[in-house]
């Protein structure tokens, strides 16, 4: 029992790191940075300029847990905090986390824009079908003595992969089109789908009935699993007045060969020692011994599974008047949102350019796993001789920091562009 609960504790601790779509990038006039999300921006690369883009970020979000219950103010969790966490949870409760880092070389050769990029992406997702599952992790089973509890939908997914991409674009007057092709290389992939259990602890604590089943896929990375992906985009209009755009991002998949570890168990513990419990000398303990073997030596068979990238469609539009810009974007996930993939969201943005070096923006969105969020960003460009620099720092979802009692997520990303004319 303790090892199973420890497993969930490790998963939760490991998930407390990680990426929401970069909501501000499509509205930038800095084409190389904007091209990270809108491939059609390739068509706006400057002739004779070659450069490097560095970008990275993280996201943490939940559909139920607020930030004050995700991050601890001290090193210990009090019973009051445990009660508050469980009270916040819904059925189901999800956590989605991600970390991203990328480098991109860009330029124009004979009027043909190009980009070569490398991205490392790590994503993690955890689902509790019922709040009392996390209660078992926080309190143990004694808290539920005398009550039968169960959960049919305990799942997690952990993936790490790399992208090698080649991108380009072309402009037809006010219409720009672009795309990127991706070679995908898998690092790590595992998925628990699903773990279900039923637990009854007698009121006096002398008997525990525990049953359930699980199936865990663990990808093998020895031969570097591979796949292919695609980004496509188009825009119409100009940055100086109005512009609309459409983008398809992260359409692709990786095929994984691996092992499927599965088992069914039905365990009754009545207070005697494990040595006696597992003994085969007593014929009455055959079933108990089989159950222990099932837990310690589960069935393992070879399997194959497809990892889908978090594909999404984005529709965006903007209008600029003077130094001000207003815009909106709608993002729709194309893959199954029930396993941590992006769900629908609507984002609104306002930016004001005080100078080429300082562009300030704010945004607010509804939807996605965190249900709502607000954020801010800084961006700008500066020319120093033949060196052209650009930057962006964006916290697209700052609700967890600004409103810890109600905010359910946070994200932060930073980008730097160095161009040579």
Image (cartoon, grey):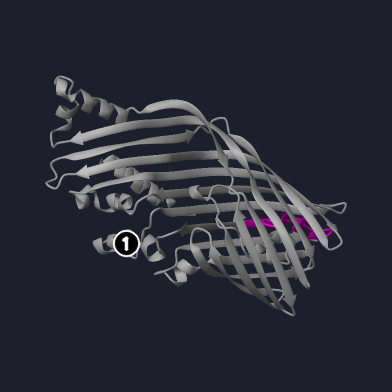
Circle 1 residue? 87
Q: Quadrant of residue 82?
A: bottom left
339 sits to left or right of 33 = left
Q: Nearer the viewer, residue 113 or 262?
A: 262
| Residue 75 lies within the magenta run | no
Q: Residue at x 43, y 40 (%)?
A: 192
Residue 378 in view of the camera? yes
Residue 386, x across and y down, in percent: 79, 64
Q: Quadrant of the N terminus?
A: top left
Vertical relation: 286 (above or below) 414: above
- Magenta residue span: 36-55
Q: Residue at x 72, y 51 (%)?
A: 232
Q: Residue at x 47, y 53 (%)?
A: 96
Residue 75, x across and y down, in percent: 31, 60
Please tell me how crowded label 1 is: few (under 14), some (14-19), or many (20+) other residues with Cα within 10 Å: some
Assign a secondary structure to mark 1.
Answer: helix
């Amino acid at each position: 029992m303790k090892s199973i609960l420890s497993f969930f504790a490790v998963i939760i601790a490991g998930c407390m790191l990680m990426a929401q779509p970069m909501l501000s990038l499509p509205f930038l006039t800095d084409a190389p940075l904007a091209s990270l999300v809108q491939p059609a921006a390739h068509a706006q690369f400057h002739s004779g300029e070659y450069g490097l883009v560095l970008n990275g970020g993280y996201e943490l979000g939940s559909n139920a847990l607020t930030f004050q219950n995700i991050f601890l103010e001290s090193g210990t969790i009090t019973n009051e905090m445990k009660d508050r966490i469980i009270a916040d949870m819904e059925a189901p409760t999800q956590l989605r986390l991600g970390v991203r880092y990328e480098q991109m070389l860009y330029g124009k050769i004979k009027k043909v824009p190009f980009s070569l990029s490398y991205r490392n992406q790590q994503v993690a997702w955890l689902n509790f079908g019922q709040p009392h599952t996390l209660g078992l992790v926080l309190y143990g089973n004694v808290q539920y003595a005398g009550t039968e509890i169960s959960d049919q939908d305990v799942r997690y997914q952990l993936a790490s992969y790399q992208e090698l991409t080649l991108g380009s674009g072309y402009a037809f007057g006010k219409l720009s089109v672009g795309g990127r092709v991706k070679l995908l290389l898998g690092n790590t992939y595992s998925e628990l789908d699903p773990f279900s259990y039923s637990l009854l602890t007698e009121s006096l604590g002398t008997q525990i009935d525990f049953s359930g089943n699980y199936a865990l896929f663990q990808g093998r990375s020895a031969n570097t699993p591979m796949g292919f992906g695609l980004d496509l985009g188009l825009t119409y209009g100009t940055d100086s007045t109005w512009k609309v755009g459409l983008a398809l991002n992260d359409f692709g998949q990786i095929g994984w060969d691996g092992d499927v570890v599965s088992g069914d168990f039905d365990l009754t513990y009545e207070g005697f020692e494990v040595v006696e419990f597992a003994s085969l000398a007593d014929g009455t303990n055959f079933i108990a011994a089989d159950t222990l073997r099932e837990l310690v030596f589960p069935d393992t068979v070879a399997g194959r599974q497809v990892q889908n990238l978090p594909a999404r469609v984005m529709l965006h539009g903007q209008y600029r008047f003077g130094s001000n810009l207003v815009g909106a974007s709608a993002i729709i996930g194309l893959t199954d949102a029930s396993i941590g993939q992006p769900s629908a969201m609507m984002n609104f943005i306002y930016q004001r350019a005080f100078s080429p070096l300082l562009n300030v923006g704010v945004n607010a969105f509804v939807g996605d796993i965190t249900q709502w969020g607000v954020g801010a960003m800084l961006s700008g460009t500066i020319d120093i001789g033949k060196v052209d620099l650009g930057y962006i720092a964006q916290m697209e979802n700052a609700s967890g920091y600004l409103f810890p009692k109600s905010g359910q997520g946070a994200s932060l990303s930073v980008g730097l562009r160095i161009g040579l004319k």
